[in-house]
Amino acid sequence: MPSIRPCLFLTAAICTLPALAQENVLNLYSARHYQTDEALYANFTRNTGIKINRIEGKEDELLERIKNEGANSPADVFITVDAARLAQADALGIFAPVKSRILEDRIPNNLRSPGWFAFSTRARVIIYNKDSINPSDVQKYEDLAGTKLKGKVCVRSGAHPYNLSLGSALIQHLGAQKTEEWANGLVANFARTPKGGDTDQIRAVAAGECGVSISNTYYIARLLRSAKPEDKKVMEKIGVVWPNQSTFGTHINISGGGMLKSAPHKEAAVKFLEYLSSDEAQAYFANGNNEWPVVKTAKVNNPALESLGTFKPDSLNIGILSKNTAQAQKIFDRAGWR
């Protein structure tokens, strides 16, 4: 019998090795495609000793992969941009509720749900050509549908999540009927068929192809920080308006993520989510990728963001946006915003 004890002890030690190894690995599925995030992940590994295995892809591709992998998925955390996309993931039932005092204390109520958390925000603002548009005429999103802007509006596709989230917010604030009227008026003011991304809209406004558009702020900050002479010339021609400061505030969207139900490394996953809410990581979102931190104690050292000034953000719970997305898409389709 005495000879069996060492064997039993050795067996127990071997059996605990996988569990111990779990604490040092995190499998991350990411739809964020920013090179600046490399330092963010490296800092996490340096601070915790947990190695990140990262798979990047488009949102739909990653969600399809997670769905196909099912309970055997190696993914611990899924992160992406836009509340509508997070809600799409949530609707698939892939997220596990996370109980963390750190996350509850640091992430504002309107920027989290039981299954996922926002870690940075970006605002959807109105941009205008300083030579052709009076900023007093574009103080609200509703103004984009006004007759003064006939043939002066350019936008990206109405099917893009950025615009669908804005439409979802307007449905919540204005009601479906007024949002449809707004969409019809907006389409009637198009200077051209929707195309390109937000940066393309900024360049089109600067070139005089149109007078006004909407853009996420981090595209604006990126151009403001650019050392290229052509980008500097573009931004000299552009003015920025924080919409709806006298009403519900400027629409904001998020970048965020959550832990998967099937996560094989749950402890590491929670540590990673908590790290993303740390002052260090929050400052990196702002200074590295021109996004606003969601944690009030995080310090921002980004002259481009600071040059845009302060604003009143829409305090709408970010989870509500998902409830109106399908309706927003139908409204935009009927209006011809495709």
Image (cartoon, rainbow, N blue to C red):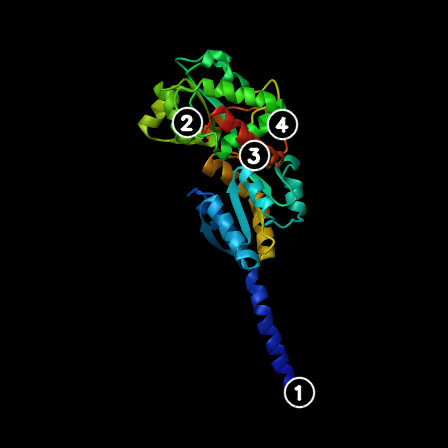
Tell me the SS state at disc 2. Answer: loop
- The tag on residue 326 is 3
Tell me the SS state at disc 4. Answer: helix
- The tag on residue 2 is 1
**Of marks 3 and 1, which one's residue comes earlier in the chain?**
1
**Of marks 2 and 1, which one's residue comes earlier in the chain?**
1
**Of marks 1 and 4, which one's residue comes earlier in the chain?**
1
Answer left or right for 323 relative to 228. right
Residue at numbered disc 4 = 172
The residue lying toward the viewer, choosing from 15 and 30, is 30
| Residue at (46, 18) in percent of width and height | 188
**Badge 4, how many Cα within 10 Å: few under 14, some, many 20+?**
some
Q: Nearer the viewer, mark 2 or mark 1?
A: 2
Q: Measured along the vertical axis of the image, is residue 258 above or below residue 202? A: below
Tell me the SS state at disc 3. Answer: helix
Specify the quadrant of the image occupied by residue 298. Answer: top right
Q: CA distance from mark 2 to mark 1?
A: 79 Å
